[in-house]
Amino acid sequence: MRLTVDAEDHGSPVIELPVAELRGLLAGAERDLADFLQLAATWSPLHLSGYAVPVVRALGRALDLPASTNP
């Protein structure tokens, strides 16, 4: 798999890696984002009082992850 920062720029940096490795890296990134969302759901009621639920939902939308935790 070849990843290019800017395909229209011939001097753009390129990263080459096997598809299986890319899948693993993407799965790891998704787990990290889900963990972050979980931490935000735990943290927000302690520091954002009435705004915790909308903030966690907005983070879930921005990260394209379901906000499965109700703060």
Image: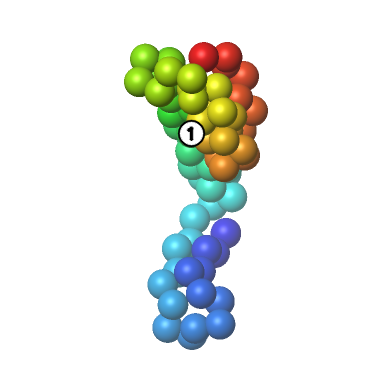
Rendered residue at 62%/19% (across/down): 68
Residue 71 image position (x, y, % from top left) = 51, 14
The residue to which callout 1 is attached is 33
Q: Amino acid at mark 1?
A: Leu
Colouring used for the render:
rainbow
Expressed as whole percent of the image width and height from the top left, the position of residue 25 reads 49, 42
Q: How many numbered discs, if any?
A: 1
Q: Looking at the image, which residue sits at the far front?
A: 50
- The quadrant where residue 46 appears: top left
- Left or right of 46? Residue 2 is right
Q: Mark yes or no: residue 24 visible.
A: no
Q: Residue at x 43, y 18 (%)?
A: 49
Q: In this view of the protein, can residue 61 be seen by the observer?
A: yes
Foreground residue among 53 and 22 = 53
Q: Residue at x 57, y 16 (%)?
A: 69
Residue nearer the viewer, 71 or 38: 71
Q: Residue at x 49, y 55 (%)?
A: 17
Q: Crowding at label 1, few (<14), some or many (≥20) Cα neighbours within 10 Å? A: some
Query: Which secondary structure, mark 1?
Result: helix
User: Which x, y percent locates residue 22?
Assistant: 53, 47
Residue 19 pos. (x, y %): 59, 50
- In which quadrant will I find the N terminus? bottom right
In this view, which residue lies farthest toward the left?
A: 47
Q: Nearer the viewer, residue 52 or 10?
A: 52
Q: Nearer the viewer, residue 43 or 65?
A: 43
